[in-house]
């Protein structure tokens, strides 16, 4: 049994998730997209699992997050939710599912929760979508926000560079974070913003600010699980740490299997019926 499997097996709810900030407990969040890996991630002690629309990149091979559909996100989220016993499970609302109207937004959010069993949904944006967020909250569904670099706006931004470096954008980000706090979000992901700004936002809000490329003075961290496991060694932005090198491990294992099959070393007599 792994030494990292936690003894605290009590389910993390939206209220417990939010309370972790007041209690001074850092939040560890990772993405997951399938049952097998989500089960391991949950047992290893993460506080929250995000079914990110990053599945569009790491699972489907798309260049960005825009192509993934609601049906595809529901498939991934259902698989993850079935595996998780403890972590707070959040599902991204993909591009096109919350931009049209509050009514359509809440309809899609209800479908995600009803068909998957996740605990909350995540939306990218601030004041521009506050009516949409309020509609989801009124339906009894917890919401996690997402500010800074919002990948669904890549065509608007033109690059995946650091956001909110200029005063006007930084001021708006602070106001958006305060707004998301005030209207009842359970937390906010801050992506690729200056560390000093992220620290300022975390101090100005009551709900957890979860950083990804936002320094260490926020309330928690999130990484794409494929990135931190080193599934693609060529992809290593500044904010990613490779905690393993699974691409090498998997390639070695597959290579050994291929060799054993071709040389008639597998299956052995002990591995036959």
Image (spheres, rainbow, N blue to C red):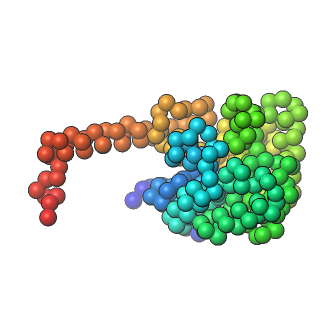
Looking at the picture, how far across and down is residue 128, in whole percent?
85, 48
Looking at the picture, how far across and down is residue 13, in whole percent?
67, 66
Along the viewing direction, whichever of 154 and 256 lies nearer the viewer: 154
Marks counted in the figure total: 0
Instruction: Farthest residue to the left: give it.
Output: 269
Q: Is residue 202 visible?
A: no
**In the rendered view, would you say 95 is above or below 5?**
above
Residue at (16% x, 53% y) in the render: 267
**In the rendered view, would you say 240 is above or below 184?**
above
Residue at (31% x, 38% y) in the render: 252
Residue at (49% x, 30% y) in the render: 234
Q: In this rendering, would 232 be left or right of 8?
A: left
Q: Is residue 141 visible?
A: yes
Looking at the picture, how far across and down is residue 79, in whole percent?
52, 62
Looking at the picture, how far across and down is residue 69, in whole percent?
62, 53
Q: Dividing the image into 4 quarters, which one contains the C terminus?
A: bottom left
Along the viewing direction, whichever of 168 and 1 lies nearer the viewer: 168
Quarter of the figure with residue 147: top right
Quarter of the figure with residue 154: top right
Quarter of the figure with residue 67: top right
Q: Dividing the image into 4 quarters, which one contains the N terminus?
A: bottom left
Residue at (84% x, 36% y) in the render: 170
């Amino acid at each position: 049994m792994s030494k990292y499997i936690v003894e605290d097996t009590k389910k993390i709810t939206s209220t417990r998730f939010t309370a972790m900030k007041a209690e001074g407990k850092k939040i560890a969040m990772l993405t997951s997209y399938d049952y097998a890996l989500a089960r391991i991630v949950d047992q290893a002690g993460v506080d929250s699992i995000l079914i990110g629309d990053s599945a569009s990149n790491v699972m489907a091979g798309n260049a960005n997050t825009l192509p993934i559909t609601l049906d595809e996100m529901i498939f991934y989220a259902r698989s993850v939710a079935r595996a998780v016993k403890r972590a707070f499970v959040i599902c991204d609302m993909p591009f096109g599912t919350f931009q049209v109207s509050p009514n359509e937004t809440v309809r899609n959010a209800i479908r995600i929760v009803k068909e998957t069993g996740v605990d909350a949904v995540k939306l990218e944006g601030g004041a521009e979508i506050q009516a949409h967020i309020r509609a989801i909250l009124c339906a009894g569904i917890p919401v996690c926000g997402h500010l800074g670099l919002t990948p669904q706006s890549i065509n608007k931004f033109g690059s995946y560079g650091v956001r909110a470096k200029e005063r006007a954008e930084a001021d708006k980000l602070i106001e958006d974070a305060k707004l998301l706090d005030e209207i009842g979000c359970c937390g906010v992901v801050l992506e690729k913003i200056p560390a000093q700004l992220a620290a300022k936002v975390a101090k100005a809000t009551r709900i957890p600010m979860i950083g990804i490329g936002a320094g260490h003075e926020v309330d928690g961290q999130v990484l794409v699980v494929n990135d931190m496991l080193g599934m693609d060694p060529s992809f290593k932005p500044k904010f990613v740490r490779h905690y393993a090198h699974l691409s090498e491990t998997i390639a070695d294992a597959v290579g050994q299997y291929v060799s054993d099959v071709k040389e008639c070393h597998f299956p052995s007599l002990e591995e036959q019926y």
